[in-house]
Amino acid sequence: MPNSSSISEFLLLALADTRQLQLLHFWLFLGIYLAALLGNGLISTAVACDQRLHTPMYFFLLNLALLDLGCISTTLPKAMANALWDTRAISYAGCAAQVFFFLFFMSAEYSLLTVMSYDRFVAIYKPL
């Protein structure tokens, strides 16, 4: 007799029960996701292409934009897929991977913000 108490997937709570609200959530999440992709993509492109922006401050800004892209790309596509296809399930491995990557990107982003604030502190209070 197989063990039936093992967890293979989680059921997520839906944001709305009606189909029209689920589609509204999908379009809202899609707009937020595209705005984040466009904004961070423009920052990354501007810093990478312009030689005058190859300074430490813009290097930190480029890395912050890339970390923000990773952070939003971890959670939002699954939420959009669940809203569009009216599903609620996520596999155990998918949930674990999503939590791991989200925590990784958030901790890296906070660490980078700490380093950026220390860089500004040194630049203001102890100039060359």
Image (cartoon, rainbow, N blue to C red):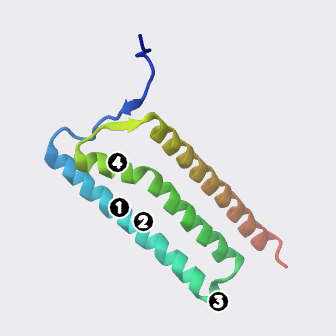
Q: Amino acid at mark 4?
A: Ala
What is the crowding at mark 1: few (fewer than 14 residues within 10 Å), some, or many (at least 20)? some
Disc nearest the viewer among 2 and 4: 4
At x 53% / y 48%, what residue is drawn? 102
Q: Amino acid at mark 3?
A: Arg
Disc 2 and disc 1 in contact, CB within 8 angstroms: yes
Kindly report the distance in space between the C-alpha atoms of the residues bearing marks 2 and 4.
Answer: 15 Å
Q: Label 1, on which residue? A: 32
At x 51% / y 55%, what residue is drawn? 71
| Disc 3 element | helix
Along the polypeptide, which appears first: circle 4 or circle 1? 1
What's the mark number on residue 36? Answer: 2
Q: Quadrant of residue 117?
A: bottom right
Kindly report the distance in space between the C-alpha atoms of the residues bearing marks 2 and 3.
Answer: 24 Å
Q: Amino acid at mark 1?
A: Ile
What is the crowding at mark 4: few (fewer than 14 residues within 10 Å), some, or many (at least 20)? some
Q: Is residue 125 left or right of residue 13?
A: right
Q: Quadrant of residue 88?
A: top left
| Disc 1 element | helix
Kindly report the distance in space between the C-alpha atoms of the residues bearing marks 2 and 1.
Answer: 6 Å
Disc nearest the viewer among 3 and 4: 4
Quadrant of the image containing the N terminus: top left
Q: Label 4, on which residue? A: 79
Q: Position of residue 15 (x, y in %)?
A: 27, 41
Q: Position of residue 31 (x, y in %)?
A: 31, 63
Q: Position of residue 60 (x, y in %)?
A: 65, 70
Disc nearest the viewer among 4 and 1: 4
Q: Label 3, on which residue? A: 52
